Structure formats: C-alpha cells, structure tokens
Image (cartoon, rainbow, N blue to C red):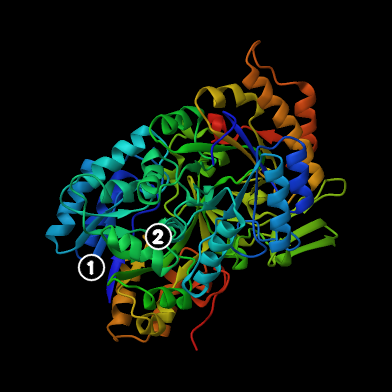
Amino acid sequence: MKIALGPLLYYWPRQSTLAFYADMADAPVDVVYLGETVCSRRHELRLSDWLEVAEILAAAGKEVVLSSQVLVESESDLKSLRRIVANGHFRVEANDMGAVHLLSSGDTPVRDWIAGPTLNIFNPTTLDLFAGLGATRWVAPPEMSREQIRALRDGLGHHMEVEIFAHGRLPLAYSARCFTARHYNLQKDTCEFRCLEFADGIPLKTREGAPFLTLNGIQTQSAQVHTLLGDLPAVCAEGVDILRISPQGAHTPEILQLFRQALDGLIPPADALHEALPLLPAEPCNGFWHGRPGVELRLPN
Amino acid sequence: MTSSRPIELVCPAGSLPALKSAIDHGADCVYLGFKDATNARNFSGLNFDDKGMAEGIRYAHDRGRKVLLALNTYPQADNWQRWTGAVDRAAAFGIDAVILADPGLMAYARKTHPDLRLHLSVQGSATSYDAINFYHEHFGISRAVLPRVLSLAQVEQVIASTPVEIEVFGFGGLCVMVEGRCALSAYATGESPNCDGACSPGKHVRWEQTPKGMETRLNGILIDRFADGERAGYPTLCKGRFEVNDETYYAIEEPTSLNTLELLPELARIGVRAIKIEGRQRSPAYVAQVTKVWRAAIDRVLAGGQPFRVEAAWMAELNKVSEGQSHTLGAYYRPWK
C-alpha cells in the first residue's frame, strides 16, 4: 500500500509552502501531487516554482504528479492547463474533462495519466472508457462508499491503480463564487488574497455553534476531518492501492507517519487513530466510507 | 431533430399538467424525467411513468414541440442497468434528445441508439470548450448545458470554439456550486445530486417551532432559524444562515433566483442556442407564468426592431415566483462572484 500526499488545497505563504515540501522529501510518502487545484488567483507559487519543487521531490525518490485545476473558467485557465499537460516530464492528474481532452487527443496523446477525484467516475463502464484513453490510476470521488468502490473495481475490464481519499477535510464543493472574499465583503477579483491568513480554511458553524463546513476560497470543505486511519484493515482488504492524505495546516508529517506505521503493522490502527486525534484541526468523521452521510463517525469494532 | 427557432425556450415539466402548461404558453421544448434516481429531480410526486410519458410526448409532438429527457445522474456498478434501460425506453418513446452526464452512459447511448440525439447535462460540469469538445469528439453530443459559473464573455468564448450548441440557464433556482461538483448534501444526508438525484431531500427535513424561533434542520443539522414574521424558507443547505468568525449571515448564498432576462439580447448576439428555465419541482402555475414571460421576451428579441427593453410587468411576474422574491444575475455579473 502506497501513501500519497494530495495537492495542497489551502493557500499558504510561499516560504511556508516551500518549507512544507522540503520536509516531504524525508517524509514516509510515496506519491506527491503538486500544483494549484482550487483558485487561479493564487500565485505564491507559479508553475515554474511547482516544477522546481517537483524536481527536488523526484530526486528524493518520490513519484511526483502535477494536479490540474478543478474549475476551469477563462482562456488563461486553459493556457495554464495546456502548460501542465505539456510539461513533458511528470504525470498529470486530470481534474476536469478539459484536461482529459488535452491529455487524450492530438497527435501525441499521453498514455499514462491519473483520473482525478472530481471527474465523477462512478461506474466500471466509465472508468474502462478512461482507461482506454490512457488513464492508469483512478482517484475515487470521496463520497463513494467501500461497497461502491469494490463493485466498481470488480467490474473493471482494465487493470488500474485505485486511490482513495483517506485523510483530511473533505473537498465537498466548488463554486464560481469565492466564499472567503464574500466573508470580507470583497469581490473575488479584488480579494486581497485573504486565504493566506487561514492555513486550514475558515470554520463555518451552525447557529447553535456546531462545526459544519470550512470555507476555502471557491471550495467548500467539511468541518470534520475525514480519516480512515481506524478503518485500515477494511481498506487493505478492499485491495486499494494508494491512500491519499490531504495536507493540513500543521502536523501533516506526523499523520503520514501514523498511517505508515499502522500499514506496516507497527501500531494497531485503533491506536493510530487515537494518537492522531490531538493532531487534527477538528473532530474526525468517516461516514462516506461506510455508505453513510459523510459527517458521521463509525468507530472501528 | 432539426430546430425551428434561432433560440429555443426549454421549460421544466415535473408533471403532465406542467408539461401541457409549458407547451400552451410557448415553450419550444420541455424537459422531464422518469420517476426514479435516473434524473436530478428525484422527488416524490414528480416525474413521469410510461403512460404519462407517452401522453406528454404526444401532446408536445402534436403541437410541433420537442421533449428532452433528463438522465443526468451518475449510475453505479450495481444499478447500471436501470440507467441503460432508461436510455432504451427514451429511444423507444421517440424522445427528441436525452440529457446525459455520465460518459459511460453516453458511450452506451451512442452505440445502442446511433440516431438518438445527445445533450450534455449541466451535471457534466463542462465549463470550457476543451471539456465540451471532449464529449463531442467521443460521443457526438449536439448540445451542452453550461454550468452557472461563466461570465458572458466566457460563454461567448466557449460558443466561438466549439461546434456544439450551447444552452444556458435563464431563470430559476440557483445552484451556487458548480453543478456536478457538489457533495454537500451527501455529506449532510447521504443523498447527493450526483448519485441520488436529490439535494437536501425532504425526508431529512425537520421544521420545529422553538422559543428561539422556527428552526429548520437537515438530518439534525441546523440550517437556519427564523424570527416571528420572517418567512421560513426550505432548508437547502447552501442557502441557510451560518456563523463565520462570530458573524451570522448567508455565508454561501441567499435564497434567491437566477434571472437573466435583461441579458437576453446579448445571449442572442453571442449565439446561445437555447435558454433553460429551472423548476421541475415547481407547480404548473409557475411553469405557465415563467414560460409566458420568457416567450414574450424572446419573441421581442427575435423580432428585432427597436432596442430591447425589459418590461416592468415581466420582472414583476418573475419576482412573484422567485425564491425569496428576489433575483440575481449570478456569475454573469462579476461582483456576484
């Protein structure tokens, strides 16, 4: 079982971002997804900077993937997408159908790319179709349950690596609107890059003070931290190939370490979960894996 | 399906009376769904069984109008046959086009029913011409419905760069999230627009009068609380009031409707092929009112002549049936973002 570090969903200052990835060179992680997937206005790191980070991590023995932006709106978004697709060195995670089109068409289609979690691939016929277009790995939509993932895998005609979202606040929705800018009564075009102030996004609570969601620019996340640390025996039994850990504001290296140790049998998964709890920015949840509302928590037996 | 008018008015039909209402008031096309999770308005009491479908299609075709079938949710491994079966039934009924989101289902429809016209649903989340051209190249889609995220200039760019006809939303309930990219309802209730055809489903809703006011909950989660005299809205979870940094407000979106009537001449100029009215869950009276206004406005634009002016009476009619009795231009208006 490999561990992947998902793309950084938040907007951190340049130095913090570079320091975070410098640490990843020594972290127990096999695959690292890089690049800005949420908002085209975020520019602390440009593509050339991401490519430099990619080179450093590749030299440290990591498999590096460049992730494409989820919501593509403008001609300049498309230009950035074309540069990522044509990088000529690193594999690409396609997060919208425009990326799939660019990867799979033209004179020299790419034969080895990753079908990202926002492509809405929910059945084996569709996944086989993408495999035929060159996808070699599928990242399941986070809302899929264990049973749904198993059924899809069992129905596949192609061999594909399967990756699931195993830890982090769930990326639940994307919008043309920026909710962080809205909170400050700013327009998106003049947002003053307020996302930089929130390493874990902005908590949103119900009117009775219960944590519910997290505002992260144009992305809305869960307030609760989805984690399958306590479910690892079941996850392994399903033949999942890769576990995605989504970067959080602090303690990501410790979380990676706990997953690695639990996978290697060095600590029981239930103990790993217990150790992880104080490291999380909020309460845990895992409902999606169990075919339940995502907000719910099912504790291991 | 050859098209009769330069801009088609595509109206919602959640029931046979709504379908007839749309046709009688000037819809060029109606769109509808079967009574199950194969469409994104899977609400009890809505949609069509085989008998209603046959009658609805006959009613429309007798009057030279078209019927589009929404099969725009995502099938899964264990229910795949229900979706392919729905495509087969649609073809057998002589539906004018099916509106699909799932690429695997499109491949099935193209192969099994080569003459069946395919539209890409808004649930396909295709926001660029590169994305739309993907579906055109592989499945021969004839039309794409754009998510409600692009500015007018961006819509124009899409139209200029694809052979696929473009349909946009003109009026109705507004999803503030990119369609097809929202799992908020799944997170709160376990049921999602993508897989179950439902957002904030009624069976999870609780209304409760409390000393603090009327509270609306979704699967136990407090979505909003209304003071006496405030009009309590349905707890669609993105349209509640929440606390962010100690401030309570509509943190995601107000209860409001999209209304692009004033943009109609621009939409026509840039080559938008069809205008969609949202609201299959709404009454035949809503369908009649909205269809009538949009028919009149589109006819005015197509007639040319003096500059287009939005009649005050049109706006008044539309505001009456708008969510929260207010409207917005949504993403067409940059400050909204």
Q: Name the spot of residue B254 as percent of width and height, x first.
A: 67, 43
Q: Nearer the viewer, mark 1 or mark 2?
A: 2
**Relative depth, front residue between A63 and B105:** B105
Q: Residue furthest bottom?
A: A301
| Residue sitting nearer the eye, B67 or A161 | B67
Please identify the quarter of the rendering in which residue A30 is found: bottom left
Q: CA distance from mark 1 to mark 2?
A: 19 Å
Q: Secondary structure at mark 1?
A: loop
Q: Is residue B4 visible?
A: yes
| Relative side of B289 to A214, left or right | right
Vertically, is B240 above or below B83?
Answer: above
Residue A210, image x, y percentages:
63, 62
Label annotation for residue A117: 2
Question: What amino acid is found at the position of numbered circle 2 in the picture?
Answer: Pro
Q: Quadrant of residue A256?
A: bottom left
Q: Quadrant where the N terminus of chain A lies?
A: bottom left
Residue depicted at x 45% and y 77%: A146
Element under label 2? helix
* Residue identified by numbered label 1: A30
What amino acid is at disc 1? Asp
Residue situated in front as seen by the camera: A165 or A86: A86
